[in-house]
Image (cartoon, grey):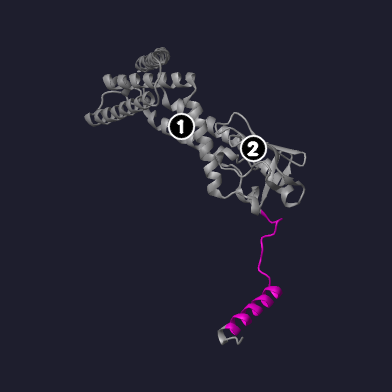
């Protein structure tokens, strides 16, 4: 049988491809190739935690500005200074603990003065989505525990919040004590980001279902929604009474209008929230009775606090008049 020119070309191309493949093999994924999913020198520490104190510093400054000239129903300047001072002190105390810990961990990490363990994840215990526990796993007799709700220098991303750890996962962990400084996962076993996000959404959905099925929590939430609706209604019935908590009379018409719109918006939001709670699922009549009792307790506490603050305000106004 005579081969045509195109057949010769195919045979030659196949042979050439075989030689090239032998001399220059295609890159393959090594079974022991690991991907870094966390490195504390790159991921950084949770500096947002002490920085959150700056929010209360701003609130304290705003209260101090409102209290200039002692125009408020109570001494907002003192409250503002106290809040800003406490927030600064709290941030400094947290930073005084975090900065030395970070420096020691960074120095040990850069100098190689840490431990490394490699193997399969065993005894994996996931953390519930709502917290109230820690995620733990063991690698070659070394056990690590952490939580998304605990501030730490090391790795703390749990599976219920999109973390990568699973039972049987091949990992390499660099650590000091219980702090994971570097976490590596074998590349061919690492779940993709969409897969981890899907697991996190499933964990959240499961938590929400369990919340809905908790009868006591349902009654408390419904009672709170009823109390909030009545309280916001009180704002709208006596708007000038509650305006005194922000400003001292007399009020300009524009000021009254702005506060009325604000109070009405709160009332509408409270009504929508209550309707959503009622429409979530059917309840026996006894649950509504218990919810009304809880709402009454909330309203009693709210009324008591309003009357106490108004009494303190009247005392301060009386004291200021006596000084004049």
- Quadrant containing the N terminus in the rendered view: bottom right
Q: Is residue 281 above or below residue 139?
A: above
Q: Nearer the viewer, residue 164 or 224?
A: 164
Residue 138 in which image quadrant: top right
Q: How far across and down, in percent of the image, does residue 132 sit?
A: 59, 28
Q: Is residue 114 at least partly visible in the picture?
A: no
Q: Quadrant of the C terminus?
A: top left
Question: Quick check: marks 2 and 1 in contact, CB under 8 Å?
Answer: no
**Helix, strand or loop: magenta stretch:** helix
User: How far apart, in angstroms, are the residues tagged by discs 2 and 1?
Assistant: 22 Å
* Disc ID at residue 277: none
Residue 178, how many percent across, how many down?
71, 38
Q: Give the mark nearer the N terminus: 2 vs 1.
A: 1
Please name the residue that numbered disc 1 is placed on: 60
**SS for tag 1?**
helix
**Residue 257 % position (x, y):** 24, 30
Q: Disc 2 marks which residue?
A: 96
What segment is highlighted magenta in the picture?
7-34
């Amino acid at each position: 049988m005579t081969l045509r020119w195109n057949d010769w070309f195919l045979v030659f191309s196949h042979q050439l491809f075989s030689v090239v493949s032998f001399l220059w093999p295609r890159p393959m994924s090594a079974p022991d190739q690991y991907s870094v999913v966390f490195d504390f020198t790159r991921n950084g520490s949770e500096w947002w935690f002490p920085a959150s104190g700056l929010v209360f510093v701003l609130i304290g400054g705003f209260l101090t500005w409102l209290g200039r000239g002692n125009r408020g129903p109570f001494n907002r300047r003192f409250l503002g200074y106290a809040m800003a001072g406490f927030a600064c002190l709290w941030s400094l105390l947290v930073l005084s603990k975090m900065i030395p810990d970070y420096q020691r961990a960074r120095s040990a990490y850069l100098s190689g003065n840490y431990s490394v363990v490699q193997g399969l994840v065993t005894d994996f215990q996931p953390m519930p989505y709502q917290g109230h526990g820690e995620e733990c796993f063991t690698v070659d007799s070394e056990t690590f525990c952490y939580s998304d709700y605990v501030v730490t220098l090391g790795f703390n991303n749990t599976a219920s919040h999109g973390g990568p750890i699973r039972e049987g996962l091949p990992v390499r962990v660099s650590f000091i004590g219980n702090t994971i400084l570097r976490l590596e996962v074998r590349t061919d076993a690492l779940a993709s980001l969409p897969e981890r996000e899907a697991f996190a959404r499933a964990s959240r959905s499961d938590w929400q279902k369990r919340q809905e099925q908790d009868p006591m929590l349902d009654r408390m939430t419904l009672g709170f929604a009823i109390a909030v609706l009545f309280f916001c209604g009180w704002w709208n019935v006596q708007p000038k009474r509650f305006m005194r908590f922000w400003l001292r009379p007399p009020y300009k018409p524009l000021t009254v209008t702005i506060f009325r719109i604000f109070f009405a918006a709160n009332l509408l939001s409270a009504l929508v929230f209550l309707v959503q709670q009622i429409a979530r699922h059917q309840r026996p009549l006894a649950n509504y009775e218990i919810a009304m009792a809880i709402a009454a307790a909330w309203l009693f506490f709210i009324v008591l606090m309003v009357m106490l603050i108004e009494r303190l305000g009247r005392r301060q106004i009386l004291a200021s008049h006596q000084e004049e």
